[in-house]
Amino acid sequence: MYGLIGKFTAVAGQRDALVELLLDCTDDMPGCLSYVVATDPADADAIWITEVWTDEASHRASLSLPAVQQAIAKARPLIASFGNATTITPVGGYGLGRREG
Amino acid sequence: MYGLIGKFTAVAGQRDALVELLLDCTDDMPGCLSYVVATDPADADAIWITEVWTDEASHRASLSLPAVQQAIAKARPLIASFGNATTITPVGGYGLGRREG
């Protein structure tokens, strides 16, 4: 499995709009096992995304999906900055849905 | 929802044993929506845990479960250090299983 833990900072006042955009495109991503969008109780503009994919190729392919491309285009003006993303190697656990890749 | 992103450092050579212990206790945690254990491709001793719970009380209660208490007791000697845990507020996404609380 392949995973990412990422943090974004939204343009002030745009966090919730950005969250909505990020949630909109999670419906049909082949190879996606988990995709959680979270806010940060310590930072009103921050958004955390934790993702688990069957493999890195599935994640990469998702970035080319039309729905994801559209969401990225809409989201970009709402993002003030990207934090460091951490690549992880999920081993197991609970809540890893299985989708046809 | 209530979430945590945490990083541990295992005692050298004990990472995989620690991962097994952490996975063993994920079977029956009321209120747990997601619990993913991951290794770190950039740090051979590191373990990441990302957790989503229905609320903070469910997470706190899980720490008192006998299976979790036993796992903590076994895991402690294998942990060299705890990194900073980040508390997050998950809003939605994919892979959030529902369990009876």
Image: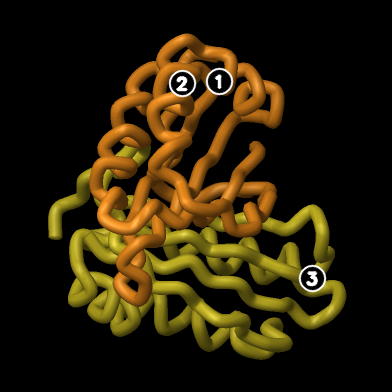
Chain colours: A orange, B yellow
Residue closest to the eye, B16 or B9: B9
Identify the residue at image location x=41%, y=15%: A67
| Mark found first going from the N terminus, 2 or 1 | 1
The amino acid type found where label 1 is placed reads: Ser
Q: CA distance from mark 3 to mark 1?
A: 30 Å
Which is more foreground, mark 2 or mark 1?
A: 2
The amino acid type found where label 2 is placed reads: Val
Q: CA distance from mark 2 to mark 3?
A: 34 Å
Dot 1 alpha-carbon crowd within 10 angstroms: few under 14, some 14 to 19, many 20 or more: many
Identify the residue at image location x=56%, y=48%: A92
Q: Secondary structure at mark 3?
A: strand
Point out residue A47 in the picture as x, y percentages from the top left corner. 40, 55
Q: Chain of mark 1?
A: A
Residues at discs 2 and 1 in contact (Cβ within 8 Å): yes
Q: Which residue is mark 2?
A: A68
Residue closest to the eye, B9 or B76: B9
Q: Secondary structure at mark 2?
A: helix
Q: Secondary structure at mark 1?
A: helix
Q: Which residue is mark 3?
A: B45
Q: Chain of mark 3?
A: B
In terms of image quadrants, where is residue B3? bottom left
Q: How many marks?
A: 3
Q: Which residue is mark 1?
A: A62
Q: Is A20 left, or right, of B13 in this rendering?
A: left
Whether residue B97 is visible, yes or no, is no
Locate the C terminus of chain A and report the quarter of the image it occupies. top right
Q: Chain of mark 2?
A: A
Identify the residue at image location x=30%, y=72%: A41
Dot 2 alpha-carbon crowd within 10 angstroms: few under 14, some 14 to 19, many 20 or more: some
Point out residue B88 in the picture as x, y percentages from the top left corner. 36, 66
